[in-house]
Image: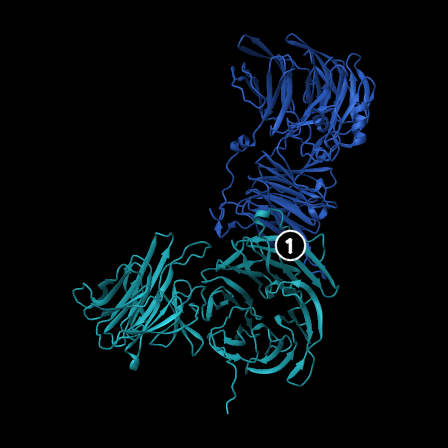
Chain colours: A cyan, B blue
């Protein structure tokens, strides 16, 4: 007998890969990244996921190689455990139960039997760096409760903690101060940046910190884009720092190369900057990385770097600043205007991806298949700039056609609209732009709908708009003397009493078209484009429309803005309000 | 004295101070012996191909480094031969520049030679092997100057972009003795080339084309965060450059290579306080007097009657007589100056324009009587025995009886002109005198020092006045002591004996000795008292210092007559407009 359980959601993909710095294996063959409750092991050469280390019950918040055995990996999680993995075979070796929410993990070669973790005690935003002694035991699950306190009031992010000079000291930054704790002397030096010097532009908050592997030098990144290199910091008075300034926006992460000869920095500019010999004039760039650099990590062998980006992507970069591999997760844009769609051909999930693109994401393999560049314009990343947005997309004819709508609205009255129709090319296995329609409507397009009926040899598309019209577009021969080229033209324009068209839908057999005009649903014959009948329920503006399928094809379903689901019987023209439902209309 | 090598580009005195190196246009480095009475040529070093632009001694005095074009030579002082020739890379950001000029070298005691060059590099060389150790590319333009601290743990360089970079010797790790040079902080206080830098134990000093002298204290060397720890920017020389003929309303302006004489305009209109009145008569540019030769003018003066002008360069003294015939003006040089009047540090005319006082750079004071178109040497006041200090400030009493003269440190000497002998000496004070004046009638000598202290000394009584003692007891207002520029001129109102008028570059002040002194709690720069307040409150808030800051920068201010005051302002924008354009730097976001 199956025991009744509460609903359990098993997360299987689409998690953030850029939550924490990625970690390279000692031989640079593998790259590890946190991915929700899992740790993923990718090959740096082929980008393929080799293993998924499953076992944590909550978000994995930190991973580090075991400094004593470079074939093992430590991971920590919000579930309060530190786990040790054999990543070559993908086996969990040990679990250390700490019992506190762990926010980040650090390991040191000099501290053999302990790791450092960030925990928060008592108050919600007071974080501490503590060292956890990992007891030696042969059992699988061991309690590790021996914590020793190192630093208090630190930033939650692991980017704000760095260990230097083989664990002689640890540097932590928060707001306007840098504190350095020396393990041997057990003293803390603290350096404060004057934030009050010019109150208006006091943007020199610390954002991240990195320690030079060989020298006593701490690099800190700041909100105003500056990088400071601190030296002589064991003396409260004689300390000194240098500034490196190239970034115009916040420095997101810093990393020294293994030998310490160069410093890597990245930020919103999506450019990886390599500062050689820590001099301002001697720098190299890797530009056009696509999105904000969130994390930078360096392989222990020194031959590879990698950057994690805000669009859920990890780029593996060769020492000579050439990108060699891209591990792309599901891109989560802030606005998913297109909603979730399934590509009928590949069964991939399709939604807004990186700016101006449509992403095709395979759910089976938890992997992005490809990005389709819809807007085909250079994306300029600047705060306050009004971008062109991809707002609607629809597949038609078993994935042979794709219609997309993009818009840009600078002012209330200035709307730029563009509709693009893409044909699937079997040879290139991709979509090719077929027709571009400028200003297909006068106002925002509210819905796109293809006629998917088999009997229609001619592909048909209907668009509905707030300007009160719906337009029928059909594929015709283009004005080509060989009559081979095809293009889309407008075939019919319909309206109903100047109401805004809010949605449209074809019936399964393609014979009827339902267009909703605010509170009214109109049914049109798709052969003659005659208005067959109207349903008016006055239940609220209709947002969604759907014809029934198969045996239910006589029904038309409509959903209104105020949460009423209506069902019309097309044969009797009777209406039934099914039920009131409480749904917050929202894209996922 | 001629070095016989063409133009001299560089000089360096040996660490012990007995030898002088000179680098010449023809590529020769010449060594001179300095003896108390003369400089004597000793020998030539190996001649180089091109001009020697920079020189530096090794602190032990055994080797020297000479920067030339495209290379640096290290010479052995004993043999005079070049030990190493270190070629400097001409490449600049990957592009080959025509030439790489070594603008400066510094020889450290550990044998490291630091060079700065026109390609924007600061390079560290090992003089023992003649190899490049480290290269710092710091600028897109020339690096023009370098100065090393005495401890050799930090140095400063100045670039043509107006940036000053500080380099420090820091240990690589806390537990090793290995040290490395690290560029630490850049300072951008200049708009134009930084031609000269200096490194004092507690501050970095830089100056260049933009006419500013900037003193930037090193915070880690400053013990207490007081006013000394503040950045200072000095724009104008701390001395009087303008003299005034009260009788004829003339102003004489001293420039580096010429003098200008202007007659002030006048107005017949009247108006309220704060009004700008229209001129009924414009100011006249009467005279433009150019110096002969390349020497700069050291000092100048116009007589109160307006008929004499005197000025001095570093080696010559000039005296002119001006004749006014209606609107015409004629200038006549007084010839046959005596040989002892070679150069002067300060020139002053007596109030009745019959006597001329010249402070020579040998420390003596010459008194000359002026007659119609001729002159007669009256007396020379020799410096006190044992002092070689020359007088650089003079003041004469309006009745012509007293002459006060001040050197750089040894106090103020007051001479009786009638008897031509020393009357008394004001006790020495730690800080140099910046302005001197003798009040009419009372013959009180008012002395302003560079630490902003003001003393009043009664010449007849040979002691400080009661007011001066009071203010010394109470102390000046802390804001008064924190002012940036010294007082450069003091004058008096003939009808108001209690008033002292003085000014610095940023303010003009009338000290009313009859009013109570301000303490630290009162407002020093008090605005005009509100008119609706009663007289009692106004009396209570009033204090001795009445300060006006409307003229900035103020170069000169004096009373013409009882009702007229002349002020000379020199807007900085005018000076900057005359400068060559600075190096264009792309500013982000423009």
Say which of A291 and A418 sits in front: A418
- Picture coordinates of residue B341, whole percent (x, y): 69, 18
Position of B543 relative to A52 (above/below) = above
In this view of the protein, which residue sits in the foreground, B24 or B579?
B579
Q: Name the residue under label 1.
A: B129
Residue B200 screen position, x and y as percent: 70, 42
Q: Residues within 10 Å of mark 1 (few under 14, many from 20)?
A: few
Q: Decide if residue B451 is in sight here.
A: yes
**Drawn side of residue B122 relative to residue A406, left or right:** right
Q: Horizontal and vertical percent for residue B32?
A: 69, 36
Q: In this view, does B499 lie above or below B91?
A: above
Chain letter belonging to callout 1: B
Where is B450 relative to A243, above or below? above
Q: What element carries label 1?
A: loop
Residue at the image point whose x is 70% and y is 33% from the top: B523
x and y, in percent, of residue A574 in the image:
28, 74
Seen at 71% across and 75% down, the residue is: A146
Asked which quadrant contains residue B350, the reply is top right
| Viewport quadrant of the C terminus of chain A | bottom left
Q: In which quarter of the image is residue A364?
A: bottom left
Query: Which quadrant of the figure has residue B570?
Result: top right
In the image, B53 versus B394, the foreground residue is: B394
């Amino acid at each position: 007998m199956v025991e009744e359980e509460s609903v359990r959601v098993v997360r299987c993909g689409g998690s953030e890969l850029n939550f924490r710095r990625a970690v390279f294996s000692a031989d640079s063959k593998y790259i590890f990244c946190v991915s929700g409750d899992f740790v993923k092991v990718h090959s740096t050469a082929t980008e393929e996921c080799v293993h998924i280390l499953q076992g944590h019950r909550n978000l994995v918040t930190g991973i580090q190689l075991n400094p004593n055995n470079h074939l093992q990996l430590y991971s920590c999680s919000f579930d309060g455990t530190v786990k040790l993995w054999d990543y070559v075979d993908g086996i969990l070796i040990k679990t250390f139960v700490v019992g506190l929410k762990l926010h980040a993990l650090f390991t040191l070669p000099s501290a053999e039997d302990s790791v450092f973790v960030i925990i928060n005690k008592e108050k919600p935003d007071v974080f501490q760096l503590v060292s956890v002694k990992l007891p030696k035991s042969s059992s699988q699950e061991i309690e590790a409760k021996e914590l020793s306190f190192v630093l208090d009031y630190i930033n939650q992010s692991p980017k704000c903690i760095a260990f230097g000079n083989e664990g002689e000291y640890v540097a932590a930054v928060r707001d306007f101060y840098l504190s350095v704790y020396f393990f041997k002397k057990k003293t803390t030096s603290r350096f404060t940046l004057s934030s009050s010097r010019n109150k208006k532009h006091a943007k020199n908050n610390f954002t991240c910190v990195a320690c030079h592997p060989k020298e006593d030098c701490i690099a800190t990144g700041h909100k105003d884009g500056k990088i400071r290199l601190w030296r002589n910091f064991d003396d409260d008075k004689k300390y000194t720092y240098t500034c490196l300034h190239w970034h115009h926006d916040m420095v997101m992460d810093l990393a020294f190369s293994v030998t310490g000869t160069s410093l890597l920095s990245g930020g919103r500019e999506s450019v990886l900057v390599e500062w050689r010999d820590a001099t301002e004039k001697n720098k190299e760039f890797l530009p056009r990385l696509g999105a904000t650099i969130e994390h930078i990590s360096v392989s222990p062998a020194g031959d590879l770097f990698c950057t994690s980006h805000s669009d859920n992507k990890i780029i593996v970069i060769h020492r000579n600043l050439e990108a060699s591999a891209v591990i792309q997760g599901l891109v989560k844009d802030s606005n998913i205007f297109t909603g979730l769609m399934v590509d009928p051909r590949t069964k991939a999930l399709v939604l807004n991806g990186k700016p101006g693109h449509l992403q095709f994401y395979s759910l089976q393999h938890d992997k992005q298949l490809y990005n389709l560049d819809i807007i085909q314009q250079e994306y300029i990343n600047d705060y306050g700039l009004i971008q062109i947005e991809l707002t609607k997309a629809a597949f038609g004819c078993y994935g042979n056609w794709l219609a997309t709508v993009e818009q840009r609205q600078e002012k209330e009255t200035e709307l730029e609209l563009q509709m693009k129709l893409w044909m699937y090319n079997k040879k290139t296995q991709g979509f090719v732009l077929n027709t571009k329609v400028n200003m297909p409507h006068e106002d925002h397009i509210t819905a796109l709908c293809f006629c998917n009926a088999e009997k229609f040899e001619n592909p048909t598309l209907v668009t509905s708009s707030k300007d009160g019209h719906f337009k029928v577009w059909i594929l015709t021969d283009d004005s080509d003397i060989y009559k081979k080229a095809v293009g889309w033209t407008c075939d019919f324009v319909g309206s109903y009493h100047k109401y805004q068209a809010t949605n449209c839908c074809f019936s399964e057999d393609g014979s009827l078209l339902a267009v909703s005009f605010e509170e009214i649903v109109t049914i049109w014959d798709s052969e003659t484009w005659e208005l067959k009948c109207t349903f008016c329920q006055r239940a609220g503006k209709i947002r969604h429309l759907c014809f029934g399928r198969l045996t239910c094809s006589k029904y038309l379903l409509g959903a209104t803005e105020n949460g009423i689901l209506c069902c019309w019987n097309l044969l009797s023209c009777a209406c039934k309000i099914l039920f009131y439902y409480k749904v917050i209309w929202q894209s996922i | 004295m001629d070095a016989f090598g063409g133009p001299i580009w560089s000089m360096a005195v040996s660490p012990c101070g007995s030898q002088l190196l000179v680098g010449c246009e023809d590529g020769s480095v010449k060594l001179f012996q300095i003896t108390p009475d003369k400089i004597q040529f000793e020998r030539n070093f190996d001649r180089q191909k091109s001009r020697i632009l920079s020189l530096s001694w090794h602190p032990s005095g055994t080797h020297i480094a000479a920067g030339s074009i495209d290379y640096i030579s290290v010479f052995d002082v004993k043999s005079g031969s070049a030990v190493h020739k270190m070629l400097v890379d001409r490449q600049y950001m990957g592009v080959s520049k025509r030439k790489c000029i070594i603008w400066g070298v510094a020889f450290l005691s550990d044998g490291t030679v630091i060079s700065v060059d026109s390609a924007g590099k600061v390079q560290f060389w090992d003089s023992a092997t003649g190899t490049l150790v480290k290269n710092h590319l710091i600028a897109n333009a020339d690096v023009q100057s370098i100065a090393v601290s005495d401890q050799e743990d930090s140095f400063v360089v100045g670039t043509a972009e107006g940036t000053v970079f500080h380099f420090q010797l820091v240990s690589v790790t806390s537990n090793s003795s290995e040290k490395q040079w690290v560029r630490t902080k850049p300072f951008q206080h200049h708009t134009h080339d930084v031609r000269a830098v200096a490194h004092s134990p507690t501050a970095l000093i830089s100056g260049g084309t933009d006419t500013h002298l900037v003193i930037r204290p090193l915070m880690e060397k400053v013990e207490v965060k007081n006013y000394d720890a503040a950045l200072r920017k000095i724009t104008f020389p701390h001395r009087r450059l303008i003299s005034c003929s009260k009788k004829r309303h003339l102003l004489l302006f001293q420039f580096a290579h010429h003098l200008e004489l202007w007659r002030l305009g006048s107005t017949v209109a009247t108006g309220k306080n704060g009004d700008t009145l229209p001129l009924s008569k414009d100011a006249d540019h009467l005279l433009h007097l150019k110096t002969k030769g390349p020497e700069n003018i050291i000092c100048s003066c116009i007589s109160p009657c307006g008929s004499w002008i005197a000025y001095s360069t570093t080696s010559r003294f000039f005296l002119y007589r001006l004749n006014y015939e209606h609107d015409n003006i004629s200038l006549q040089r007084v010839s046959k100056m005596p040989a002892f009047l070679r150069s002067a540090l300060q020139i002053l005319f007596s109030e009745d324009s019959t006597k001329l006082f010249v402070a020579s750079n040998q420390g003596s004071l010459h008194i000359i009587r002026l007659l119609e178109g001729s002159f007669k040497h009256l007396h020379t006041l020799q410096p006190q025995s044992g002092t070689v200090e020359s007088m650089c400030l003079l003041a004469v009493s309006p009745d012509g009886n007293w002459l006060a003269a001040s050197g750089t440190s040894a106090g103020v000497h007051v001479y009786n002109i009638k008897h031509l002998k020393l009357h008394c000496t004001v006790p020495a004070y730690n800080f140099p005198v910046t302005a001197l004046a003798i009040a009419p009638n009372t013959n009180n000598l008012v002395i302003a020092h560079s630490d902003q202290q003001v003393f009043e000394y009664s010449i007849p009584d040979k002691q400080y006045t009661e007011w001066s003692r009071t203010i010394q007891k109470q102390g000046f207002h802390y804001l008064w002591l924190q002012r940036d520029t010294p007082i450069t001129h003091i004058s008096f109102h003939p009808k108001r004996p209690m008033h002292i008028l003085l000014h610095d570059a940023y303010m003009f002040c009338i000290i009313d000795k009859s009013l109570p002194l301000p303490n630290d709690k009162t407002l020093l720069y008090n605005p005009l008292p509100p008119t609706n307040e009663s007289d009692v409150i106004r009396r209570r808030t009033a204090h001795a210092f009445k300060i006006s800051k409307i003229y900035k920068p103020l170069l000169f201010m004096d009373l013409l007559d009882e009702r007229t005051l002349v002020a000379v302002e020199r807007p900085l924008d005018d000076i900057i407009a005359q400068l060559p354009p600075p190096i264009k730097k792309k500013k982000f976001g423009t």
